[in-house]
Image (spheres, grey):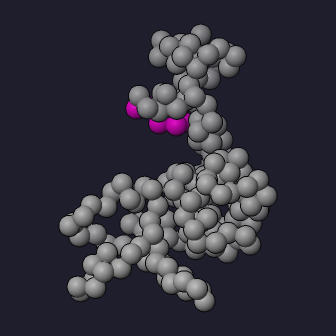
Amino acid sequence: MDVGGVGYGLLVTSEDFGVLAVGKDFKLYVHEHIREDSHDLFGFTNLDTKKLFELLLSVNGVGPKMALNILSIASSSEMRKAIAGGDAKFIQAANGVGKKVAERVVMELKDKVGLAGISSDSLLQSTSAQHDEAAQALIGLGYSPSDAVTALHGIDGQLSPEERVKLALKGGK
């Protein structure tokens, strides 16, 4: 990052890294983390992501790099849904996050992630879609997570993901 001719290195999420381009102007929300042995800057293109990052830092055992790893596996809204839905396994997918830390994140932040307007049904649908290969395939074809889950509803879960997708595209059963 170049600010008034001074260059700074920032750590960013995978999602933000894909959006940022050399030579283009961007507005970044920066979190400064100072310790005895380091001075790190974390940049976010979205204020909501920065706020979730800071919430993650409040969890015992979650440092700034682990929080960044957690936010790199999904968008901040998807991560908020996973936390509110109690999906510790989803959080465990982040590099360096074990079962205990993931469960602690869910336990400590479940009521703090700010999802009052989201129904428990849509939380269930979005988190179940993230762990279903057939749902992921439908999402890849343009379905929303809730539409993918709805399309697969009633189709035998024991079938291969390919068969389930074919049946869902045909309208079920």
Q: Is residue 21 left or right of residue 134?
A: left
Q: Is residue 143 left or right of residue 84?
A: left
Q: Position of residue 8 (x, y in %)?
A: 35, 79
Q: In the image, is residue 143 above or below residue 162?
A: below
Q: Residue furthest bottom?
A: 36
- In the image, the segment drawn in magenta is 142-146
Quadrant containing the N terminus is bottom left
- Classify residue 70 by image quadrant: bottom right
Q: Nearer the viewer, residue 111 or 131?
A: 131
Q: In the image, is residue 71 above or below residue 36?
A: above
Q: Position of residue 44 (x, y in %)?
A: 42, 68
Residue 21 is inside the magenta segment? no
Q: Magenta span: helix, strand or loop, mainly?
A: loop
Q: Is residue 112 left or right of residue 166?
A: right
Q: Position of residue 154 (x, y in %)?
A: 65, 18
Q: Residue at x 72, y 51 (%)?
A: 88
Q: Residue at x 21, y 66 (%)?
A: 24
Q: Nearer the viewer, residue 17 or 137?
A: 17
